[in-house]
Amino acid sequence: MIKVSQLQKVFRIHQARSGLAGAFRDLFNRQYKTVKAVDGVSFQVEEGEFFALIGENGAGKSTTIKMMTGILTPTDGEITINGFVPYKQREDYVKSIGVVFGQRSQLWWDLSPTESFRLLQRVYKVEGEDGKRWLDRLVEELDIGGFIHQPVRKLSLGQRMRCEIAASLIHKPKLLFLDEPTVGLDVLVKQKIREFLRNLNESERTTILLTTHDVSDIEALCKRVIVMDQGKLIFDGMLSDLKEKWGNGTEIAFQFKQRIPVAELRGLLGEYPCELFAENEYAVRVKLQRSREMLPLVLSSVMASYEVSDVKVMESSTEDIVRNIYSVDSEVAVNG
Amino acid sequence: MRQIIRLFSDYLSQYFKTRLAYRADFVGDFLSNLVSELINLVFIVVVFQHVSLLKDWSRDEIIFIYGYFLIPFALFSMFFGFWDFNERYIIRGEMDRILTRPVHNLAQVCLESMAPDRIFGVITGLLIMGYAAIRLHLSFAWYDIPLFILLVISSTLVYAGVYTGIAAISFFSDSRTGISPMIYNIQNYGRYPVDVYNKAIRITLTWILPFAFVGTYPAAYFLRKEMWYTYTMLTPVIGVVFFAIGLSVWNWGVKKYQGAGS
C-alpha cells in the first residue's frame, strides 16, 4: 500500500553572514549549505497497519511525512501510495488520505466545527447520505457532539484536537497521517483519542501513520516502529524487537523469607546468562539480557527452590529505550 | 471548475454568516465602506477639477478611465486579497494544509482570503463612469454591455496574473519579499492615460506589466477613441496570456515549495 524506496530530500539553505557588511556581501555572493534532511529511506507498509515514526527533533520525520503527503517533492527516490505518486498526482492522491498536523489547525477559526465539516464535505465531494452517516459516526465516537456548534476559537485544545481528527477523516480516507496529535493534551483526552484510533484501525482497516514524541502513544497503539536519525532509517520492526535491541533488559527483584547468600543463588542460576545484585541479605535483583525466553525459567527455578515473599518484574520502558537510542546516536554523531 | 464555483458560493455564505454574527460590526463596516468610497469619489472629482487637459484627453475622459479602472481593481482585490500570502501561507506554513486538499491550491488561497466587501469599489467605479459619461454625452449600444463585462473580466485577469506570478516568488525565496508594494505603485500608472508617459513607461505598461490594459485601453473603446481600438481588442488576449503566465509561475513555485519547519 505504501512503498517508499531510497527516498531523499536535500535542502539548500542560505547561510547568512553576520552583520550589516555581511548582509551586503550576501547580496552579491550567497553561500549555501546543503542539508540532507532525508537520506536514502526505504520501507513498505501494508494495508491496515498502525505504525509509528519516531526520532529526535530534526531527524527528518516531518520532511518524510511531507513528502508522503505530497506537500514536498523528493530530491530523489520513489514513493507510491495507494497507487499514486503523491507529488505528481497530488489532487487525486489527497482524496485518499487524511492528515492531522498537531501544530496546525485545519478548521476555520471563526466557524463552528459543524460549518467546517460541511465545507470539507464539499471540498471532498462527500455531501451524500453516506457522508452524513459517516460524519455522525465520527461525531459520536469522538464524543464531540456537545460543542461542535461553538466557534473553533472558543474550544479547548482537547476539544479542538478531536474535531481536527474528525475533520481529517471526513472523506473516509484509506490512510491517515498523524503528526504529533497528542501534543499538550491531558491524559483523559489522549486516552479517548487513542481508543478512537484503535477502533478505527480495527473496524475500517484504516492504515495509520503516527509521529510522536510521546512514548505512551506508541506503546498504546503501534506494533510497528520506524526510527529515524539524521535523515536515515535506523530501525524498522516490531516494538518488542525494538525493546530487545535497545532496552536495558529485564530486572527481577526477589524478596526472600530467609537469608540467601548471593553465591548460592548464582550457583542455582549457573547456566543462565544473568547478573545478580544483592540489595541486602533478604533481597536480590536479577538482571536478564534476553528477557522473553529467560524470564519464566529464572522465575520458576528460583521459586521452586526458595520461599519467596515478593517478586517484582521491571521491564525497561519504551521511554528508556527511546532515550537509549537518542543518546547512542548523538555519540555516533560525535564520532562520525 | 464547477466545484470551485460551488465552493465559492459556500465560502461566500460562510463569510456573511460570520460577519452577520457580529451585527454591530457588520453595520459599522458597511457604513464605513460606504463613507470611504464616497470620500474617494469626492476626492477624485475635486482633484480632477484642477486638471483640464492631459495631452489630448479631456478631464471628463480621464475621470471615465479612472472610473473604469476602479472596477477591475475592486474585483481583483475581492478575489486576490492575499496581500499577506508570504507571511500567512509560507512563513506560518498554512500552505501545507492547502496542499493536502483536493482542490487547486491557488483557488483555495483565493477563496480563503476573499474580501467580498470590496464590491463597493465596483459601485463607486460605476458611479464615476456614469458621471463622466453624462458629462461627455456618451451613448452606448446594447452590445456595449457584454463587451464591457468581457473587458472588465480581462482587465481583472491581467491584475490577477501579474499578482499571482509575483506572489509565487515567495515559494522560491525564504525571506520576506518587499516586491508587492513596488507593483502596487506601478499599477497606479494604469489609471491615467498611458500616452502622457514617455515611451519606455508606455512600453512597460503595455507589454511587460500591462497595467494599461486595466484602464486606458479598454476604457478608450467606450470613449470612442478609435486610435486605441486595436489595443482594446487585445485586452482579452493579454488578460488570458498574463493569467496563464502567472498561473504557470505559481504551479512551478508549488513544485519548488520547501515548506516551513516542524
Image (spheres, coloured by chain):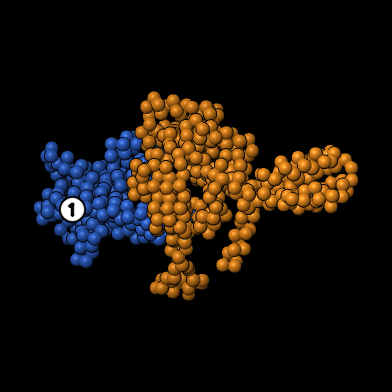
Residue A299, x across and y down, in percent: 75, 41
Q: Nearer the viewer, residue A179 or B57?
A: A179
What is the tally of numbered marks visible in this picture?
1
In-image side of B11 versus B64 (left or right): right
Residue at figure coordinates x 72%, y 42% from the top left: A297
Residue A97 appears anywhere in the view: yes
Q: In which quarter of the image is the C terminus of chain A?
A: bottom right
- Of all chains in the rendering, the one displayed in blue is B
- Residue B121's spot in the image, x, y percent? 31, 44
Residue name at image x 22 percent, y 56 percent: B212
Q: Quick one: which chain is orange? A: A
Is residue B245 rendered to the left or right of residue A175? left
Q: What element carries label 1?
A: helix
Residue lying farthest to the left in this orientation: B226
Give the residue pinned by disc 1: B217
Image location (x, y in percent) of residue A135: 45, 29
Regarding residue A184, the answer to whether it shows in the image is no
**In screen coordinates, is A222 left or right of B59?**
right
Q: In which quarter of the image is residue A305?
A: top right
